[in-house]
Amino acid sequence: MKLWPTLFLSIVCGSVFAQQKEVTGIVFDKDSKARVAKVNVQNITSGKGVYNNFKGEFTIGAGPGDVLVFSKPDHHSDTLTVKNYAALAVYMKPMAIHLQQVTIRDSFLTPQRRLANTQREFSKIYGSAYNADLLNVGSGGVGFSIDALYSAFSKSGRNAEKLRGLIDAEYRQSIIDYRFNKAFVQGITRLEEPKLTDFMQKYRPGYYLVTTAGDYEFIAYIKANLKRYLRRPWAYGLAPLPQVKWEPETK
């Protein structure tokens, strides 16, 4: 008869000991496979919750059958049921599209650096005449700047102004090419050649959009135009060239 109280206490102690066990694991980004920190790990069975550390690691009191919920503002929540006390590897899918890091090397100049090099090469047209004001304020009062008058009325000054305009226009186009490049657009649209080039030519963004839109807005712009392109791939195409028949003159 004394065996039953002892057996009962053993079962109760064993149950309490089992409830005090902990489950450990690491949270990863499903796309990049990088560790994700500041994830809220909630045991909805027991009501306990913790945050993982900056290494993505967490430890929480749980046992087989408990349901754990992992949540973070910039990731989709994930739920799993604990099966045993083995370490867990949790993969959370990010809400935004993950853009791969691009390393720009010296051999590939940014538009800003190319413009700076061009301005150094054409230093004459970007010299004092370019920055001179038409009105010059000096010790004798307000007068006309000789450099500004020369730039405005001389033939070489007008030619320099045209050249500056061409260089600036080319710079704006290079800014568009730099952001709206094939690798980036193909990663979003999954288009292959020749459709990729055709799409980029028909839905090329403007300079203002490229320089003011954030990543989310810019990707949304490309996706919206991709839907239009897939519905009507022939739209905005150039008309076929007319057939011209040439007949040699006969004497």
Image: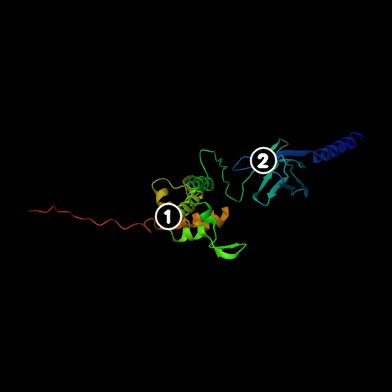
Q: Is residue 144 left or right of residue 197?
A: right
Query: Which residue position holds label 2?
Result: 35
Residue 156 is tagged as 1
Q: Position of residue 75 (x, y in %)?
A: 64, 49
Residue 98 vs residue 245, the one in the foreground: 245
Q: Quadrant of residue 65?
A: top right
Q: Amino acid at mark 2?
A: Arg
Q: Quadrant of residue 239?
A: bottom left
Residue 104 vs residue 75, the one in the foreground: 104
Q: CA distance from mark 2 to mark 1?
A: 61 Å
Residue 33 vs residue 44, the one in the foreground: 33
Residue drawn at x 50%, y 56% as measured from the top left: 207
Q: Is residue 51 left or right of residue 210?
A: right
Q: Position of residue 16 (x, y in %)?
A: 84, 40
Instruction: Provide the secondary structure element on which disc 2 rests.
Output: loop
Residue 221 is tagged as none
Q: Position of residue 63 (x, y in %)?
A: 75, 41
Residue drawn at x 70%, y 48% as measured from the top left: 69
Q: Position of residue 222 (x, y in %)?
A: 49, 54
Residue 71 vs residue 157, the one in the foreground: 157
Q: Amino acid at mark 1?
A: Ser
